[in-house]
Image (cartoon, grey):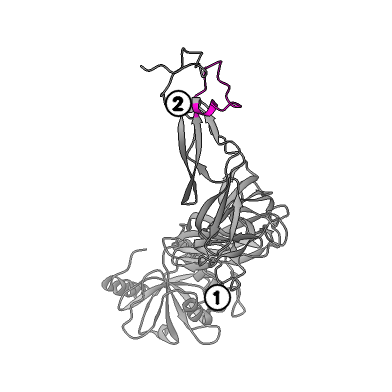
Amino acid sequence: MKSIGKKTLAWFLTVLIAFGAIFVVQIPVSAANNPYPLDGGNGVAAGNCTYTAWEQAYNRMGIALPAWGNAAQWYDRAAASGYQVIPYSTGVVPPANSIACWSGGYGHVAYVVAADSVGMVLHESNIDPYGNGTYLKDLEQWWSYSSWRRNNLQGFIVLQPQDATPPVITNVRVSQLTNQGYTVTCIVTDNEGVNRVQFPTWRSEITSDGCIWYNGVRNGNEWSFTFSDANIATYYTTHIYAYDNAGNYSTAGIEQYVDKTAPVISNVQVSNVTGDGYTVACDIYENQPDSLDRVQFPAWTHVNEQDDIIQQWWTNPEASGELTKLDSHHYHAVYRVNRSDHNNETGEYLTHIYAYDKWGNAGIMGSTPIQILHGSVQSISIASNPSKTVYYVGESFNRSGMTLRVTYQDGFSETIDSGFTVSAGTFSTPGIKSIRVTYQGKSTSFSLTVHKRLPFVDVPASGVYYSDAVQYVYDYDYMTGMNPTTFGPADNLSRA
């Protein structure tokens, strides 16, 4: 209904007085969801004022008001519920589509259809307009502020059009998985404001009846909830209910598995041991597919306890092994322990292995074989030459039997037969060859002899006094013999 202007209201009042009649409007009502009874009060079926005020708000504005009790309680309870209220004072003009509230006894409420500075049009029930004890069940009439209606008038409840738009839930995600639960986070927005977000959670294999509705924690538009009551390994369901201030709601949900079985570590191997470090490798089995998170290798020396262990090794990437995924359940991890990461300390090193899945379950290998690091190599020398030191052109070097004596930073020495490089391959020329040997940045050398093969049928390779002499002059092309197959060691030498 449009607002009635001051002149119109005054004219309307003059007409009513002239004709000596009260203008009564009968408006159909709908009691759907109305928390107040239609009849009652003053011993006659004059209708409850609370019933009619509630119906008017519902029929005209689409607003289903809460049950605020007796009329005398409406003003204060509406304010407590977040509704705007305007206290009455001289000169106050209530907005149309508000509710006027009176105190005293059970109080009284009426729906404000229109108002100006002179008076207001009210729609109400259980009203005695004549003051003669006759209460009307449904009345819509103009009243002046100067009339007795201002007595005990507390003020007005302002009604706004009902919000019908539910909140919007986006960016639902699961994080912080543990073997006790997980965290659900989402973004919730609403055109009028979000009232609350709840997260009912239960085991997926059973009914949701009786599940706990957890209240979310708000950070701006982000709402989150941490579930920490997963007492068995199974799937859990979490639904999201987002409510606005008008009672509209939206839903979303996730299902998440919680695992309690730790990965299994096997086939631990140590290799590439040098004075400055060693390599640890292992295999890992994870019962849930694609769920191994990381493998950590905390290492330390016996010197000064664990002062050299990597800080926060359980999550620090510096202590993480390099993972190779073999299939959805099997993995291989490799980690290099470097002395430079442990204060360059020498002596005994210990390494443990921890394999974590994405729920934080940890498989543990208490200790790998103790490794002793002696520091960097200070010097090397030939401990024993190769078994073979004489070769013919076209033959390849054979290191069999060769060993090195290695001295380390801490004074420790050892003899090794592998791990070093030798600068020799297939020999193409005769002569005395200096062969270079290198190990961890240090080098030494030794010599061996390479000959041409003698083609002479009259010169044994050994066993006679002139064999070495013939071999020498033939290696260096000083003498080539009588012909390609005969040297003639007993013949006279002719001057050229």
Q: Secondary structure at mark 1?
A: loop
Looking at the picture, how far across and down is residue 163, in whole percent?
Answer: 45, 61
Looking at the picture, how far across and down is residue 232, in whole percent?
Answer: 73, 59
Q: Residue at x 46, y 57 (%)?
A: 165
Quadrant of res 30: bottom right
| Residue at numbered disc 1 | 68
Looking at the picture, how far across and down is residue 231, in whole percent?
Answer: 72, 62
Q: Which image quadrant: the C terminus?
A: top left
Is residue 281 visible in this depiction of the protein? yes
Residue 452 relative to residue 237: left or right:
left
Q: Secondary structure at mark 2?
A: helix
Give amino acid for label 2. Answer: Val
429 up-or-down from 110: above or below: above
In depth, the one of 474 and 20 nearer the eye is: 474
Give amino acid for label 1. Answer: Trp
Magenta stretch: residue 466 in it? yes
Looking at the picture, how far across and down is residue 402, in whole percent?
Answer: 59, 43
Q: What's the distance in space between the residues labelled 1 and 2, CA to CA?
A: 126 Å
- Residue occupying the far front of the picture: 492
In depth, the one of 378 and 229 nearer the eye is: 378
Observer-side mark, 1 or 2, equals 2
- Residue occupying the far left of the picture: 7
Query: Which portion, as a residue range, is magenta?
Result: 451-469
102 up-or-down from 446: above or below: below
Which is the main secondary structure of the residues drawn in magenta?
Answer: loop
Magenta stretch: residue 436 in it? no
225 up-or-down from 147: above or below: above
| Residue at numbered disc 2 | 473
Q: Residue at x 56, y 79 (%)?
A: 70
In depth, the one of 434 and 341 nearer the eye is: 434
